[in-house]
Amino acid sequence: KAGVTQTPRYLIKTRGQQVTLSCSPISGHRSVSWYQQTPGQGLQFLFEYFSETQRNKGNFPGRFSGRQFSNSRSEMNVSTLELGDSALYLCASSLLTGNYGYTFGSGTRLTVV
Amino acid sequence: QQQVKQSPQSLIVQKGGISIINCAYENTAFDYFPWYQQFPGKGPALLIAIRPDVSEKKEGRFTISFNKSAKQFSLHIMDSQPGDSATYFCAAGPSGGGADGLTFGKGTHLIIQP
């Protein structure tokens, strides 16, 4: 059974640019949640999508957005990148909406220069 | 923002010993308390989780102890092995989800010395 796949694994962007990250959940999982991981703040919740609808959103600015497609694959977008957006972005999939039973991907390491 | 406080920040244990990591939470609405293990270059992997209706849950060498009145829970790793060396995160949240998703502790870097 394939795990959660995140692409790309590494990304370097310049301040002011925008970036799109992709997440393919485990087959059959309908919920995708996104987290930002930094050494200072740890893991912080960005948002959750279930059946193509955003169910919950964390305390991040509007520059952070996402969407989910009918096949449950999800993308997140960060516009007008700032140096502080440098982080490991993790997506987690689960069967149902909510926090139960996450399986995380290996993440996308974003560096903003 | 609701916090989950995790301690210690780092821990060194001899092979065969018991590793103990503690967490405390604030929000009494939380009803799901998982522990995650993360190796370098990988995402966190769910180790074990507990609900507040039980005080202890054991899976192999891993045990969660839960104290609802004190709002504390801990992870015990029995017979610790070098392969257990990783970063461990506790987390807490409403199982049904919510605006904050899961709230994670800051992590414990565990080293098991052979």
Image: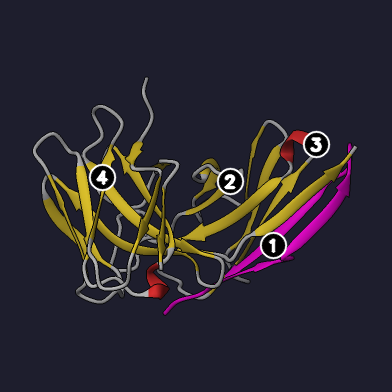
Q: Where does label 1 land, which residue?
A: B22
Percent coordinates x, y for residue B36 in the rendering: 55, 48
Q: Where does label 2 land, which residue?
A: B38
Label 4 packing within 10 angstroms: few (<14), some (14-19), many (20+)? many
Do callouts 1 and 3 mark residues in contact (Cβ within 8 Å)? no
| Label 4: chain letter | A
Tell me the tag on residue B82. 3
In the picture shown, does residue B29 fall above or below B1? above
Residues drawn in magenta: B1-24
Left or right: B63, with A20 as reference point:
right
Foreground label between 1 and 2? 2
Foreground label between 3 and 4? 4
Labels 3, 4: one chain = no
Amino acid type of the residue that numbered disc 1 sits on in the rendered structure: Asn
Q: Where does label 4 land, which residue?
A: A22
| Residue drawn at the location 38% of the way across and 58% of the way down | A35
Tell me the tag on residue B104. none
Percent coordinates x, y for residue B38 in the rendering: 58, 46
In the picture shown, does residue A75 fall above or below B78? below
